[in-house]
Amino acid sequence: RKLLLSQRELGASFEVEAVQSGLDLTPENSPELFPGEAMGEDALRLLRDYRRLHASVRKTVRASLAPVEATVAWGKRKFQR
């Protein structure tokens, strides 16, 4: 009923018959479903990608800030009357 490592409750009972004990899971016979980089093995690459995306978002926010501030100022003047 629980996951092996986290002990998270699954809410369902799995019978012993559901386990496929005859599977050959040796490394040469069971390739990964995803390449290593897709699973986060290259932490430095992921950090570099994150920093590039973060910089792009900050640049967009900075460019949008002046029009937003002008709109807020206009709204204050317009509706304070």
Image: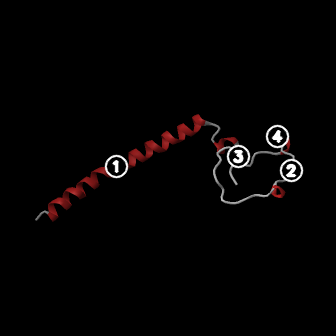
User: Real-space Cα distance between discs 3 and 2?
Assistant: 16 Å
Give the position of the N terminus as an image quadrant: bottom right
Secondary-structure class at tag 1: helix
| Residue hosting label 3 | 4
Query: Which of label 1 and label 4 is nearer to you?
Result: 4
2 vs 4, front mark = 2
Residue 21's tag is 2
Could you tell me the amino acid type at mark 1? Ala
Q: List the residue tagged with mark 4.
A: 27
- Upstream in sequence: badge 3 or badge 1: 3
> In percent of the image, x 25 and y 53: which residue is there?
69
Give the camera-side residue of 64 and 44. 44
Crowd tier of the residue under label 3, counting other residues whose Cα lies within 10 Å: few below 14, some 14–19, many 20 or above: few
Badge 2 element = loop
Rendered location of residue 50, percent (x, y): 51, 42
The image position of residue 31, as x and y in percent, is: 79, 45
Indicate which disc, 1 or 4, sits on the residue closer to the N terminus.
Answer: 4
Circles 3, 1 touching at the beta carbon (< 8 Å): no
Please give the name of the residue rendered at 69% of the width and 60% of the height, measured from the top-left corner.
12
Q: Secondary structure at mark 4?
A: helix
Q: Residue at x 84, y 53 (%)?
A: 20
